[in-house]
Amino acid sequence: MSSVNSFWSRICIRLGVNSKQFGVLLSICVMALGIVGTKVVIGGPSKAAAKSAVALSTIAAVTPPPSPSALKAVAFTLQTWPSRDPFRGSSNQGNSPDPGALGKAPASLRLGATMDGQFAVINGKTLKEGQSLTDPVSGSSYRLLEVETRSVTMEAGGQRFQIAFD
C-alpha cells in the first residue's frame, strides 16, 4: 500500500495539485464515465437516433440512386500561363496594351527600378501609374501607363512604348 501512496504522491507533486482534491476529482470523473457507459450499453440508442435512422432508411428506399448515364462529367481546363499576375493588384486589369502595338522607346529614358507593381523610377524620378514625366532632352511629356516586374509601359502623343531594365 505504501508503494501506491508514494506513486500517488509523486504524481500529485509533478502536477502541482493537492492529493486529496485531485483524488476526489478523479473519482467523480470515473463515476460519471461509468454512468454514461452503462446508459449507452443498457439503454441502447436514444429515441431521436432511432427516428433519424428510420427517416434515412425510408428516404433511401423511396429515392433510387441515379443511373450512371444520368451523371454528368465536369471537366476543368487550366491555363498554361495565368492571364494576370496573382501577386499584383487589380488596378490595371484588362488595360494592358497589345504587345504588337508598342513603339520604340526614346533612348533618353532609363528605367531605374519598379516597386510594388505601381511605382517606377525613370531617369531618377519616382512615378506612380498615371503620372507624367517630361524628358529634359526632347521636352516631350510621357505618361506612365503600367508597371510590370521588369518593365514599364509609357505613352507619348498616342504612341505606346515599353522600357525594360538593361
Image (cartoon, rainbow, N blue to C red):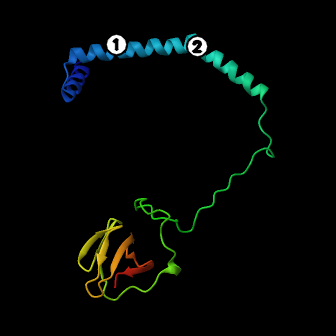
> The N terminus lies in which quarter of the figure?
top left
Q: In the rendered view, would you say 106 is above or below 92?
A: below
> The C terminus lies in which quarter of the figure?
bottom left
Q: Which residue is mark 2?
A: 46
Residue occupying the point 43% across, 59% down: 90
Q: In the rendered view, would you say 159 is above or below 95?
A: below
Q: Name the image quarter holding residue 62.
A: top right
Residue 45 seen from this side: no
* In this rendering, position of residue 98 left or right of residue 166: right
Q: Tell me if mark 2 has few (under 14), some (14-19) or many (20+) residues whose alpha carbon lies within 10 angstroms of its own.
A: few
Residue 78 seen from this side: yes
* In this rendering, position of residue 133 left or right of residue 161: left
Mark sitting earlier along the chain (2/1)? 1
Residue 120 percent coordinates (x, y): 31, 72
Q: Amino acid at mark 1?
A: Ile
> Closest to the observer: 64 or 28?
64
Q: Name the image quarter holding residue 92.
A: bottom left
Residue occupying the point 27% across, 88% down: 137
Residue occupying the point 29% across, 82% down: 135
Residue 77 percent coordinates (x, y): 63, 61
Q: Which residue is mark 1?
A: 28
